[in-house]
Amino acid sequence: MTDPRGAAADRLEEIAAELDLAAQHCRVAAQHYRERNVPRAAAHAWAAQGHVHHGTTALFQLAEEHATRSVPSTE
């Protein structure tokens, strides 16, 4: 049996890694813009957006799964 909290923690680590990749692409894109290499900068910016999309999609899925188990409480 899988521990749901452990599984959620693992997924959050995966999401963080995905968003780290986005940040790396942003740094590379910034350097290319400084070098006035717009095509390469744009390619890395586009890759960053893909990683952000993948990471946020996974985060929303995790939130939706949590919502199915969460019970509202006044405490």
Image: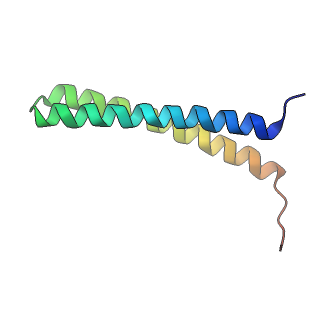
Q: Where does the image place residue 12, in percent across and percent down from the top left?
A: 63, 39
- Relative placement, left or right, of 42 versus 5 is left
**Nearest the camera: 7 or 50?**
7
Q: Residue furthest bottom?
A: 74
- Relative placement, left or right, of 16 versus 67 is left
- Tell me which corner region of the image, top left, top right, bottom left or bottom right, holds residue 61: top right
Name the residue located 31 percent from the left edge and 37 percent from the top edge.
Answer: 26
Q: Is residue 56 above or below residue 31?
A: below
- Relative placement, left or right, of 39 versus 16 is left
Q: Where does the image place residue 28, in percent across and percent down from the top left?
A: 26, 31
Name the residue located 54 percent from the left edge and 37 percent from the top edge.
Answer: 16
Q: Where does the image place residue 31, in percent across and percent down from the top left?
A: 19, 33
Q: Where does the image place residue 52, in percent across and percent down from the top left?
A: 45, 38
Q: Which quadrant: the N terminus? A: top right
Name the residue located 12 percent from the left edge and 37 percent from the top edge.
Answer: 34
Q: Residue furthest left?
A: 36
- Tell me which corner region of the image, top left, top right, bottom left or bottom right, holds residue 8: top right
**Nearest the camera: 43 or 35?**
35
- Relative placement, left or right, of 72 versus 25 is right
Q: Which quadrant: the C terminus? A: bottom right
Name the residue located 68 percent from the left edge and 48 percent from the top edge.
Answer: 63
Colour treatment of the image: rainbow
Label tally? 0
Q: Residue furthest right?
A: 1
